[in-house]
Image (spheres, rainbow, N blue to C red):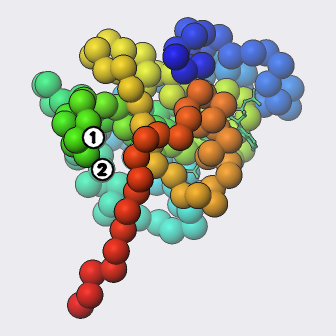
Amino acid sequence: MTRTSTPPAGTASPRRAGARRGRAAPDEITVRPVRRADLDHVIAIDTLVTGIEKRPYWQRVYKRYGIGFKGEQRWFLVALAGKRVVGFLIGEVRDWEFGSAPCGWVFAIDVDPTARQAGIGTKLLAALTDALRETGVRKLRTLLSHDNTLILSFFRSQGMMAAPLIPLEMDVAP
Ligand SMILES: CC(C)(COP(=O)(O)OP(=O)(O)OC[C@H]1O[C@@H](n2cnc3c(N)ncnc32)[C@H](O)[C@@H]1OP(=O)(O)O)[C@@H](O)C(=O)NCCC(=O)NCCS
């Protein structure tokens, strides 16, 4: 069982650095599905974190994951400190792909650098694991770059372990 499934969302420890530094305490953070008006803030956080603005990409992602369709098990969630978007997460259930039973995947998570280490990433992931649990899915996976030690530390802190999968790639000759 992952650590995210143990405490209910919103019960992060008050010892967190963000709270110490006067940032929004974890209890003041809310997580909800993205709205069209949030997209500029999501794009701004992604641009800040990656250094590349990809508006057309985010508009496609919003159409695919942000607009709820009946029966779709997709989540595009935002975390808010008051009314300010301070983070987002995108995940979904993939059925029978890669030869495995229906399984949750988180493929994007970003917290505004000014709001980190205050439990927001944990809250976002807990919201996804809660949603997965409700759908009956019992496994969550992700892929990460081997040199991204920050995201590795985060996912490890949430209880994620190496999966019995091997990512492969090849160049496609022109
Ligand atoms: C990873 C990320 C989502 C964490 O968000 P966050 O709100 O700061 O995370 P939390 O406050 O919930 O931290 C949970 C745990 O993660 C780990 N962690 C978080 N930041 C860390 C850091 N800078 N160094 C080491 N471990 C860290 C800690 O174990 C922490 O638990 P603790 O506070 O009890 O020590 C955020 O740093 C981020 O957006 N990073 C960039 C993400 C990225 O590269 N995205 C692209 C790929 S999808």
Q: In this view, does 172 lie to the left or right of 4?
A: left
In this view, the residue farthest toward the front is 164
Tag 1: Cα neighbours inside 10 Å, few (<14), some, or many (≥20)? many
**Alpha carbon separation for disc pair 2 and 1:** 6 Å
> Residue lying furthest left in this view?
70
- Secondary structure under tag 1 reads helix
Q: Which residue is drawn at 44% across and 22% down?
A: 129
- In this orientation, which residue lies closer to the viewer: 92 or 56? 92
Where is residue 116 shown, x and y percent of the image? 70, 39
In this view, which residue lies farthest toward the right?
20
User: Dot 1 corresponds to which residue?
Assistant: 65
**Three-letter residue code for mark 2:** Val
> With 102 as the anchor, is 147 left or right in this view?
right
Q: Residue at x 14, y 25 (%)?
A: 71
Q: Does the residue labelled 2 lie within 8 Å of ligand 1?
A: no
Circle 2 residue: 61
Q: In this view, does 113 lie to the left or right of 41?
A: right
Asked if residue 109 can be seen in this view, the reply is yes
Quarter holding the C terminus?
Answer: bottom left
Residue drawn at (24%, 29%) of the image: 102
Q: Give 63 or 71, whichever is nearer the viewer.
A: 71
Query: Which of the labelled discs sits on residue 168, or is there none?
Result: none
- How many marks are shown on the rendered structure? 2
SS of the residue at dot 2? helix
Residue 139 location (% of width, % of height): 38, 26
Residue pictured at 46% horizontal, 54% vertical: 43
Q: Are the residues flagged by discs 2 and 1 in contact, CB closer than 8 Å?
A: yes
